[in-house]
Amino acid sequence: MHFLLLGATGRVGTRVLERALADNHKVTALVRNPQKINQRSEQLTLLQGDACHPYDIRRSLESVDVVISCLNTDGGTVLTESTPLLIEAMKAQGVSRVVTIGTAGILQSQEHPGLLRYETPDTRRSSTRAAEEHRKAWELLQASSLSWTVVCPTYLPDGEALGTYRVARDFLPEDGKSISVGDTAAFTYSVACSQEYVGCRVGLAY
């Protein structure tokens, strides 16, 4: 397969890239600073650019089968700027499958039907800005005709893949408290290699 990977220099994106290259897939990584990518492979194409620029997104999608976006909010509006551009470019290029990383805050609340987890009275978030960015990106994907999946990990400490995590469609697994970067990357990559969990958010936790 040929993946476009956005956010390849981040904690999750770095590990997704390792897995894809280890399985001998082609990967195009659109990055602002190619020097931050340590991996080298004949299967890897590094494009210097910005996911918030329409031209860069369009050129990065050439011959791509699946998009994996590990972009985060970067303390700003990266997601709400880049997601509409990505959707438009994917439709123009005939690419339908996209897997993105969200946050457990945009999953449905178990205790408060009709609310997302970040909207509930008992949320521990000091700020909802990042969750609102993720929500807008998810709603844009939801309104598109793409085959999308949003992977929603809870608290995300560094750590290797253990392979013992739990998943739930649109909700966080009960009493889920954390999930390692390694397992988040492993699950995201496995979903991108399949048509599983199309059209839903997926809660991820131990």
Image (spheres, rainbow, N blue to C red):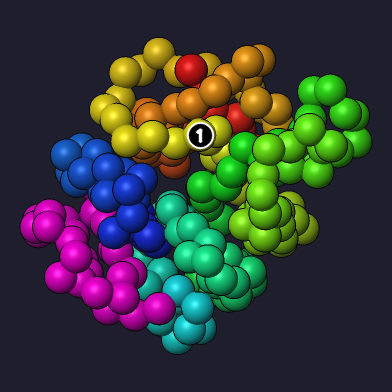
Q: Is residue 37 magenta?
A: yes
Q: Residue at x 54, y 28 (%)?
A: 204
Q: Quadrant of residue 108?
A: top right
Q: Residue at x 70, y 27 (%)?
A: 171
Q: Position of residue 8 (x, y in %)?
A: 31, 58
Q: Quadrant of residue 39?
A: bottom left
Numbered label tally: 1
Q: Could you tell whether 37 is left or right of 107 in the image?
A: left
Residue 165 visible in the displayed image: yes
Q: Residue at x 31, y 44 (%)?
A: 16
Q: Position of residue 66 (x, y in %)?
A: 44, 53
Q: Could you tell whether 116 is left or right of 138 in the image?
A: right
Vertically, is 86 above or below 114? Answer: below
Q: Could you tell whether 205 is left or right of 49 in the image?
A: right
Neighbour tally class for label 1: few under 14, some 14-19, many 20 plus, Cα within 10 Å: some
Vertically, is 194 above or below 139? Answer: above
In terms of secondary structure, where does tag 1 sit?
Answer: loop
The residue under label 1 is: 155
Vertically, is 181 above or below 175? Answer: below
Q: Is residue 185 magenta?
A: no
Q: Residue at x 38, y 34 (%)?
A: 157
Q: Position of residue 98 (x, y in %)?
A: 52, 52
Residue 59 visible in the displayed image: no
Magenta range is 25-50
Judging depth in this view, the residue of 164 and 95 nearest the camera is 164
Judging depth in this view, the residue of 94 and 55 nearest the camera is 55
Q: Residue furthest front?
A: 126
Amino acid under label 1? Tyr
Judging depth in this view, the residue of 73 and 70 nearest the camera is 73
Q: Could you tell whether 44 is left or right of 144 in the image?
A: left
